[in-house]
Amino acid sequence: MQFVSIPAGTFMMGCSAGDPDCYAEEKPVHRVTISRPFEMGKFQVTQAEYEAVMSVNPSNFKGSNLPVENVSWQDANRFCEALSSKNDGCRYRLPTEAEWEYAARAGDASCRYGPLLQVAWFRDNSGGTTHPVGEKKPNAFGLYDTLGNVWEWVQDWYGITYYSHRQESDPKGPESGEYRVSRGGSWRGIVRGQSRVSARYILKPNVRNMVVGFRCVREQIR
């Protein structure tokens, strides 16, 4: 797995300026500081990577370099725990929702970091399937497919009013909830409402769906 170094910084989280497609759950826009640099997966976790760790491939669309999908939040979390248990000097986890949006924006305040056809697989160009990771243009941090291909699980529980009761520095989301959050849109997503950096998609943590995968954060522990 390849990782990209993401610098610390501050950004405006939530509905992008001038974006007409925002939902209420993406508001209010609020300032968030990511106080420490971190490493994030350059690509969505592939089926080959998932199978190498978990010895199974649950994906609907098969291909070693396709993103793994049909994984629940619980599955994604178990993958991170299993990878961490290999004692390579690193801990792996899902990104927080704030980390994910900060990394996906890569300093861009607009709803997309480039023309959608150039940066994302979505309903209009996917042909009804996922595609190998890394085929579209990356964002300014060097991350691929943060829009489209598959939604990406993040750590956070979902709270519909959470943006109104936020922490400004390194927020981790509500302490509990019924649903977990995923971000970024998918191969089945429509332009309006979904293929945007502030869009949020929620599922119960045990639910698997062929439009949802994940990427990891890596932390050095030695």
Image: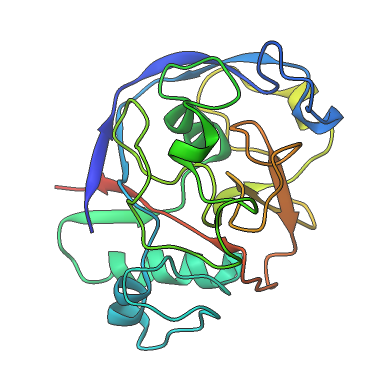
Asked where in the image residue 87 lies, by quadrant, the reply is: bottom left
Asked where in the image residue 39 lies, by quadrant, the reply is: top left
User: Left or right: where does residue 88 sit relative to residue 29?
Assistant: left
Q: Position of residue 205 (x, y in %)?
A: 68, 65
Colour mapping = rainbow
Q: Is residue 178 visible?
A: yes
User: Left or right: where does residue 203 sit relative to residue 3?
Assistant: right
Instruction: Identify whether 12 is placed above or below 94.
Output: above
Instruction: Identify whether 221 is placed above or below 32.
Output: below
The residue at the point 39 percent across, 15 percent down is 9
Residue closer to the observer: 84 or 154: 154
The residue at the point 28 percent across, 70 percent down is 85
Q: Position of residue 131 (x, y in %)?
A: 44, 62
Q: Is residue 175 visible?
A: no
The residue at the point 29 percent across, 64 percent down is 84
User: Left or right: where does residue 205 sit relative to residue 99?
Assistant: right
Residue closer to the observer: 171 or 104: 104
The residue at the point 34 percent across, 56 percent down is 92
Q: Position of residue 56 (x, y in %)?
A: 41, 88
- In this rendering, the count of numbered labels is 0
Residue closer to the observer: 220 or 122: 122
Instruction: Identify whether 64 is placed above or below 37.
Output: below
Q: Position of residue 179 (x, y in %)?
A: 76, 56
